[in-house]
Image (cartoon, rainbow, N blue to C red):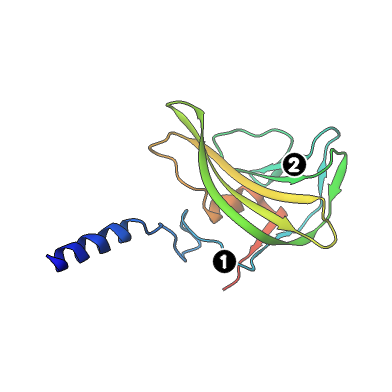
Amino acid sequence: MYRIALTLTLLALAGCNTAQTRDVNSPFYKIPPGSAIVLNKELNIPAGQAHINLQDGTPSSAVGNYNVSCTFSVRNLGPSTIQPDTFKIRETSSSQEWVSRPDIMRFYREFRLESATQPDVMNFVCQDWDGPMMGRPVSVPEMQTAVGEYVSFKFSQ
């Protein structure tokens, strides 16, 4: 009886394990502590906005929701410019939320950023919209396609 209870307990605990992996190409890749986001080219934030989007390697004030896009957010309304810099990733999260039940969900990864020279830059979010049964977290290769030459990722080991 003890072995059966122990086996069932171990199986239950195994089910609580996350799908995180060390494969950078997987949508379940866990960003290691100490990683960074490198902005290679300056980004101009338009007047009256506090963010700039990147999709298909191009900055834009608006994006199509069904292709992966990434957004830098700042504390104050523009116009302003985010200068090339290396932003330390303080914290990451990956989640989803309903956009329109029961058909559309937003899948996203959020990176809370830190820079000694640009403290106004708060976070970087990459997202995609999809059906709840087909959607999944945004992968690093998808993010790289969205940001093009503007952003590089430096992952710690």
* Residue that appears at 44% across and 40% down: 135
Sequence-wise, the earlier of marks 1 and 2 is 1
Image quadrant holding the N terminus, namely: bottom left
Residue 137 rendering spot, x and y as whole percentages: 49, 48
Mark closer to the observer (1, 2) = 1
Amino acid type of the residue tagged 2 in the rendering: Ile
Q: Is mark 2 on a helix, strand or loop?
A: strand
Q: In which quarter of the image is residue 80?
A: top right
Under tag 1, what secondary structure?
Answer: loop
From this viewpoint, which residue is outermost toward the bottom?
157
Residue 41, x across and y down, in percent:
78, 55
Which residue ends up furthest to the left in the rendered image?
1
The relative height of residue 107 versus residue 100 in the rendered view (above or below) is below
Mark 2 packing: few (<14 Cα in 10 Å), some, or many (20+)? many
Q: Quadrant of residue 37?
A: bottom right
Q: Quadrant of the C terminus?
A: bottom right
Q: Position of residue 35 (x, y in %)?
A: 64, 66
Asked if residue 148 shows in the view, the reply is yes
Which labelled disc corresponds to residue 32?
Answer: 1
Residue 128 image-quadrant placement: top right
Would you say residue 68 is visible in this rendering?
Answer: no
Can you tell which mark lies on residue 52? 2
Q: How far is disc 1 from disc 2 in space, using C-alphas?
A: 25 Å
Residue 139 or 50: which is nearer the viewer?
50
- Say which amino acid is labelled 1: Pro
Residue at figure coordinates x 21%, y 66% from the top left = 6
Disc 1 residue crowd, few under 14, some 14–19, many 20+, Cα 10 Å: some
